[in-house]
């Protein structure tokens, strides 16, 4: 069976378990030969591609721009399955990215504007300068 169809079959079965988010997967990137993984959410499946969104300035974004090899791993306990997907990532179009952003809740949009994903917060005065109240 076409692996995309197989994925969709299992994904639909996994969705029946309401106690988990079946879209969550571990995303692996490589920077200077060092692997890094973190959880990300799958937003869409398009023919030939699994789409997620992130900040390009994050560690994963910076890693991807230097080395496009990505690895994804889903685990769905209720159906006793894991799916691993390896390949070269591609950026979605600016239009798709803007479209996704415009549909995010207002609080998430503000969070994305305000935060530098993956960078350390040096101290509390940094946040005060950015008008976050501690
Ligand atoms: C369940 C879950 C889902 C997440 N989904 C996303 C996501 O879709 N996009 C994203 O950029 N970060 C997401 N995160 C946060 C990332 O795991 C990570 O902490 C952040 O993106 C910074 O990663 P980096 O420093 O490796 O780039 C999620 C975290 C969790 C626990």
Image: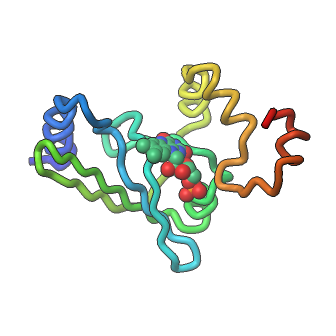
Please name whichever residue, 9 or 26, is drawn nearer the observer in this view of the structure: 26
Residue 5, image quadrant: top left
Q: Is 22 located above or below residue 28 in the figure?
A: above
Image position of 11 (left or right of 130): left
Image position of 9 (left or right of 41): left
Quadrant where the C terminus is found in the figure: top right
Question: Residue farthest to the bottom?
Answer: 33
Please name whichever residue, 23 or 120, is drawn nearer the observer in this view of the structure: 120
- In percent of width and height, residue 77 lies at 17, 47
Question: Residue farthest to the front?
Answer: 134
Image position of 69 (left or right of 67): left
Q: Is 67 located above or below residue 98 in the figure?
A: below
- In percent of width and height, residue 108 lies at 61, 28
Residue under the image location 87 percent in, 39 percent down: 128
Residue under the image location 63 percent in, 60 percent down: 62
Q: Is residue 111 visible?
A: yes
Residue under the image location 72 percent in, 57 percent down: 120
Image position of 125 (left or right of 12): right
- In percent of width and height, residue 16 lies at 17, 29
Question: Residue farthest to the left?
Answer: 1
Please name whichever residue, 26 or 88, is drawn nearer the observer in this view of the structure: 26
Q: Is 84 located above or below residue 52 in the figure?
A: below
Q: Is residue 91 visible?
A: no
Residue under the image location 89 percent in, 47 percent down: 125
Residue 6, image quadrant: top left
- In percent of width and height, residue 24 lies at 36, 43
What kind of colouring is applied to the model shown? rainbow
């Amino acid at each position: 069976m076409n692996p995309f169809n197989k994925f969709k079959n299992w994904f639909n079965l996994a969705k029946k378990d309401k106690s988990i988010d079946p879209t969550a997967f571990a995303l692996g990137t490589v920077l200077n030969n060092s692997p890094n993984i973190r959880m990300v959410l799958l937003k869409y499946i398009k023919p030939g591609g699994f789409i997620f969104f992130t900040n390009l300035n994050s560690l994963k974004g910076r890693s991807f721009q230097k080395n496009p090899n990505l690895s994804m791993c889903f685990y769905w306990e209720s159906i006793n399955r894991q799916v691993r997907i390896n390949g070269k990532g591609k950026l979605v179009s600016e239009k798709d990215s803007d479209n996704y952003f415009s549909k995010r809740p207002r609080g998430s949009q503000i969070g994305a504007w305000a935060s530098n994903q993956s960078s350390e917060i040096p101290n509390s005065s940094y946040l005060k300068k950015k008008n976050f109240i501690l």
